[in-house]
Image (spheres, rainbow, N blue to C red):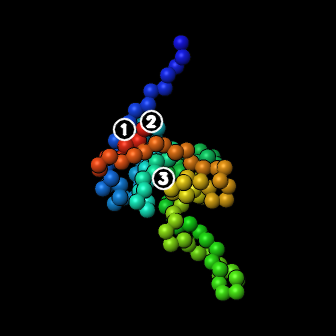
Amino acid sequence: MSAETVRRDVVVAGLSDLRERERIVVDVDGLELGVYFHAGEVRAWHNVCPHQGGPVCQGKIMPRTVQLVREGRKSGGPGFHPTDRNIVCPWHGFEFDILTGRHPADSRVGLRPIPVRVEGDDVIVTI
């Protein structure tokens, strides 16, 4: 007899509330998730940092750091991207793109996505 995984849909937020707050962290049957609204998109991530298991979704949301380039291709020092945002793990500062879940320096490292969709005002995850 084989074990069958049963997946189900769970409403975790209202879209209007998520838009206002930008992020919520929820527990669905013992599975902690971070649900985000950014640039008109909704994403959901497992709340575990791949670095050392920290609660990544409870970290700050920060603009992506970029290297500014001045005239003559000279360094203008660090700056911030005007629209891209990263989730910053509160344990060790590992960063992940809010929309892709990827680490900016190593695309092999990333957050575990949770299927999410919007129906009307309901934000629904599939677990």
SS assignment at label 2 = loop
Q: Are marks 1 and 3 in contact (CB under 8 Å)?
A: no
Quick one: quadrant of the C terminus?
Answer: top left
- Camera-nearest residue between 127 and 32: 127
The residue lying toward the viewer, choosing from 118 and 27, is: 118
Q: Nearer the viewer, residue 117 or 48?
A: 117
The alpha-carbon separation of the residues under discs 2 and 3 comes to 20 Å
- 96 displayed left or right of 33: right
Q: Which residue is mark 3?
A: 58
Image location (x, y in percent) of residue 13: 34, 47
How many numbered marks appear?
3
The answer to whether marks 2 and 1 mark residues whose Cβ atoms lie closer than 8 Å is yes
* Sooner in the amino-acid sequence: mark 2 or mark 1: 1
Q: Which type of secondary structure does the marked residue at label 1 adopt?
A: strand
User: Residue 127, labelled with which disc?
Assistant: 2
The disc labelled 3 sits on which kind of residue?
Gln
Residue 99, how many percent across, how many down?
A: 51, 56
Q: Earlier in the sequence, mark 1 or mark 3?
A: 1
State how far apart marks 2 and 1 are (Cα): 8 Å
Residue 120 is labelled as none
How far across and down, in percent of the image, does residue 84 sit?
52, 65
Residue where numbered disc 1 is placed: 10
